Structures are given as C-alpha cells and as structure tokens.
Image: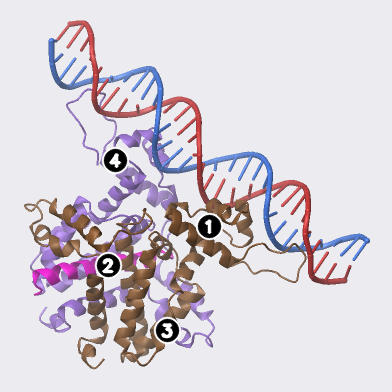
Chain colours: A brown, B purple, C red, D blue
Amino acid sequence: MTTAQRGRPGPRRTLTDEAIVTAALELLDRRGADAVSIRGIAAELGVAPNALYTYFPDKAAVLRAVADRLIGEYDLGALANPARPWRQRLHDLALSLRSRLLDHPGATAMLLGAPMDGPRALALGEALLAVVGEAGLDERDAARASYLLIVYVLGSIALEAAEVEPTRPAPPEAQRVAARKAAFDAVPATTYPLTAASADVMSRYITTEQFRWGLDRVIDGFAGPAAAAHQ
Amino acid sequence: MTTAQRGRPGPRRTLTDEAIVTAALELLDRRGADAVSIRGIAAELGVAPNALYTYFPDKAAVLRAVADRLIGEYDLGALANPARPWRQRLHDLALSLRSRLLDHPGATAMLLGAPMDGPRALALGEALLAVVGEAGLDERDAARASYLLIVYVLGSIALEAAEVEPTRPAPPEAQRVAARKAAFDAVPATTYPLTAASADVMSRYITTEQFRWGLDRVIDGFAGPAAAAHQ
DNA sequence: CGTCCAATCTGTACGCCGTACAGAGATATG
DNA sequence: CATATCTCTGTACGGCGTACAGATTGGACG
C-alpha cells in the first residue's frame, strides 16, 4: 500500500502490509467483523494503533487489502486449465469463491464496500475474460459477461452473508434453511399468497443448490443453453 | 418496529417510526452515509439520542427500516399492469429500483447488510413472483428466478455504489466512466493484456446500458431468449 | 375525581472508535 | 561521526452506540 522508501534513513520496519492483512483476517475469524478495527489489529500485532498508518493511509485501505487477499486465494491456474470444459471451470471458480468468502462472514461488506481494483482482483478479472472468451463470445460481450458473473457471485454471497454475519462460524446450511422456513411460515397467506405458497423454495434461496441453479441460468443467458451440451 | 402500547399510561409519543426513517433519509442525502448515526438522527429531530430507543431496539433496526422504505418506493401496481409485456415490467422495476437506490449512495450498504424481511420487501417479492410466473415458469422456478433477479439488481447497484458512496450526489455517468477509463488505462498491458484490450467496455460496466444488457441476459437465462419475441 | 404506575424522554456516563499531532529513538547515507 | 529521515509511541480530540437512573406525563381504575 505505502511504498516503503527503503534505502533511506530510519529504523527497520517491524511489520509488513501482509502481516497486517493476516492479523485482520485472524481477528475477523476469531472475534467477528466488528472486531476488525485499527486498534484491534494493532493490539493483535503488539504495536500502538497509529503504527499502522505507516503502512496504510486509513482504515478503508486496510479493508481493501483484506478484500484483495480473499479474492486472491483462488488458484487462477485451475481457471485456465484447458482439460476441463469452460463451464465447469466457471462453476469451480464461483463455488470456490462462495465457500471461501462465506468462511469469513463479515468480509462481504469489505468486498462490496470498495471498488475491486487490487492486483489480485485484476488478475482474476483477466483470467475470467479468457475463460468467457472460450464460450465463443466476442471481446465486447466477453467483458460484459465477466462483469455479470462477478455481480451474480458477489450479490449472492452478500445476500447470504446478511443473514449470518455477526456470529463467527456460519451455522450449517440445513439449520439456516430451517430458520428461513420458520420465518416464511409466519408470513400471512392471505396478504402474500404466492410467498406463502413458495415458502419451501424461498427458504432454500441460500443453499448451494440455488446458487448453482442461478449460476447456470446466468451462463445460459450469455452463452445460450446449447452451450451446456457441447461443453 | 416497536409495538406502540397505546391505551397504556405514559406521556404522548413525540415521534413515530416513520418520522425517524424520514429523518435518517434526509440526513443520508444531505450529509452522506457516515452522518446517519443515532445521534445525528436524534439531533435532526430535536431529541436526545436515546429517545430513539423507544421506537427501535438498536441502530441496525433503524437501518433496516430505512432499507425497507427505499424498497417500498416503487409502485407495485405498475408491476401487475397486464397492458405491458412482463419483460418490460421487469425492466421498469429493475431500472426504477436502480435509479432510486443510486439517488441515495450509501444506502446500498443498508440493503445488503441486513436480511430483506420488511413488509415492503415482502410485498415486492410477492409482486415479483406473480410477474415471473407470467413468463411461463412453474412455481418452483418462478421463485428461484425472482431471487436471481433480486441478486442481480442489488449486486449491480452495490458494485456501482462502491465507487461513489461517500460523496453526496453521484457525479454524472459520463464522468464516472471517464474516471474508470483512466484507471484501466493505467493497467499494464503486458501483465493483463485482455483487461487492457477491454478497457473501453470495462469502464462502461457502471452504465445503464450495461445494466440493461445484464438484466436481459439474466431474463434470457431463466425464460429463454425466445421469450423476448412473443413478449 | 384522585391515585397510581407504566411509558417516555433527558442527563450522564462508559468504553469503544478513527486518527491528528508532537516527539523519541533508530539508522543508512554523506 | 554527523545528519537527515523514517518508524514507532504517547497523548488527545471528537464522535460513536447504548446502558442506567430519574424526572415527567397522563391514561386506567378505584
């Protein structure tokens, strides 16, 4: 973040940008999203709070770096592997991003709250462009489709995480579905007949199965359902 | 939010839930998202901060009510009007939601940060289910498609708002596109050739045109491109 | 009509937060 | 060795959400 002016006078740095991001993630997982504060991260690292301002200009920059770290956890090599059909590679990417991000509930606010312009986000965008290009789209539509995929994946994750966020580990899917079912069953069927009738499906919105279904509809939308057949 | 136990002893209430939500929105538009604090809203209403706790249990509940107000601004009657083709009605809804929410940059965090279980959100979901049903989907797929649409619309808006949020009125689209173009032109073409080649398209991700394109791809995905023809 | 007591609001306080500012100590360069 | 500069600490400010105690109000009920 801050360009370390090395080769200049001054004491050695005791931290690195990466160490700060790691401490922030550690805190995120152990004590929840609200605990990720400048003061909390500094305590985790055993330094005074304002020491972090040597490495990042402000808190938002730290959170952006955390978001970029999370995005970058996916192995982009797998995305380029020509042995697997491109549609399956997109599924792998989307499902992997989803599970990694849901492992850190509370991180989604960071991802959606800041523009994704970090180096790892760029690398992912680049790899995504290549895969979508394989679907036979021209350069223009490939770029648009890439963005559509990102919107879908991040939007899904955000809506799922909104129901989970504060507590540390997300409860198992079955339990979250049951909680949603109970909430929908409380909806008056007279005012909202369709909602009440679809309570079963709607309580399953947050499942991996629904995520896959939506992903396939999105891909069908830009590549055509036929593309499913000839891989 | 709080069930007013009227008919019980105690002085008359000086506020209402709605007045608090209105003040919060006023503050959001005039002074930005960070100004929407319990203390700020209370000052806007000429009341001590903790007076609000008579109406809402905590700040998160206030923000949820604000989100529900924003969602409810759309006229659901238009969504049911059978004179217009269902696809056009979906476009109307999506574009209206987008422009209303982008009028309040900073509100998206509220929408995505809390489960959408308010009364107006339910009403919108109900109306959406009806429209999607007209596309010829069975009950199950209609529910899934409704959720897919919501994910797309809110995800798009969130990613757009992330580049704008802090300042009050969003700059005009052309200006935001130009800023993005400048950023993408700075990307090294050697490391990210596809990104650099698509800089023009990518800088236009945040435009209404791209939003419409993505919306049509999503609708195509669940209804089939053919559905565009026979309305 | 008088009494009671729950509902509502205010005053005050606590413990957080992000971060600005000044200064002490360390250290590569001259 | 001297100096210029970087890094970290101490301290402080203004703001936040909200818990708690208490004054005030006014409908319900004897």
- The amino acid type found where label 3 is placed reads Ala
Q: How many marks?
A: 4
- Residue at disc 3, secondary structure: helix
- The amino acid type found where label 2 is placed reads Val
Label 3: which residue? A127
Residue B31: where, in percent of width, then height? 43, 49
- Residue at disc 4, secondary structure: helix
Do tags 1 and 2 sit on the same chain? no
Q: Is residue A204 visible?
A: yes
Between marks 2 and 4, how big is the CA–CA gap? 30 Å
Q: Is residue B79 visible?
A: no
Q: Chain of mark 1?
A: A
Q: Marks 1 and 4: CB-CB under 8 Å? A: no
Image point (32%, 88%), residue name:
A86
Viewer-nearest of discs 1 and 4: 1
- The amino acid type found where label 4 is placed reads Ala
Label 4: which residue? B19
Label 1: which residue? A59
Q: Nearer the viewer, residue A205 or B230?
A: A205
Between marks 3 and 2, how big is the CA–CA gap? 23 Å
